[in-house]
Amino acid sequence: MDEPKRRTVLAAAAFAAVTGCSTYGEPKSAPASTPQAGTELAKTSQIPVGGGVLFGDKQVVVTQPTAGTFKAFTSVCTHEGCQVASVANGTINCDCHGSKFSIKDGSVVHDPAPQPLAAKQIKVAGDSITLA
């Protein structure tokens, strides 16, 4: 039985590493079109107090740190550009490398993210939350 050549094994390993990890930790591209001011994101009742909701297609996360206070941030992690994955226990969480951000102000709560999430401008009118 012939043993594979070292070069073949190395090439196969490199290919597997590149293709196997091509989506993990990979920066996400910008949305197909940038959402315009006035775009409705949610109803206020959809955003849990002490939590938040991701709008990945618009690259926005909306939080409600305290009752009646709504905040919005980019949903793109400042570490390597991954889309954040969840909002839980007072933080916005990126599953790529474990970064966590405060739902109050987007500040880094757990690295490796080097910068806070950038704030997005929103308008709350009645029960509607829109981009400002």
Image (spheres, helix red, strand yellow):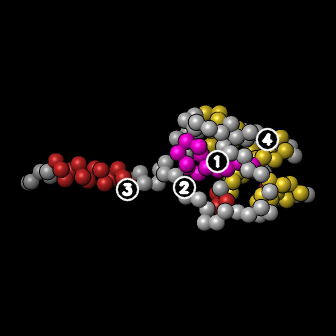
Q: Residue 88 at what x, y percent from top left?
A: 68, 42
Q: Which residues are magenta?
A: 72-87
Q: Specify which label sits upstream in the sequence, 3 or 2.
A: 3
> Is tag 3's residue or tag 1's residue first in the polypeptide sequence?
3
Residue at image x 46%, y 54%? 23
Residue 19's tag is 3
- Disc 3, SS: helix
Q: Earlier in the sequence, mark 2 or mark 1?
A: 2
Kind of element beneath mark 2: loop
Cα separation, mark 3 vs mark 1, equals 25 Å
Q: Earlier in the sequence, mark 2 or mark 4?
A: 2
Circle on res. 86:
1
Dot 1: element: strand
Of marks 2 and 1, the one in the foreground = 2
Disc 4 marks which residue?
65
**Residue type for callout 4:** Pro
Q: Name the amino acid, label 2.
A: Lys
Of badges 3 and 1, the one in the foreground is 3
Q: Name which residue type carries label 3.
A: Thr
Residue drawn at x 64%, y 61% as measured from the top left? 57
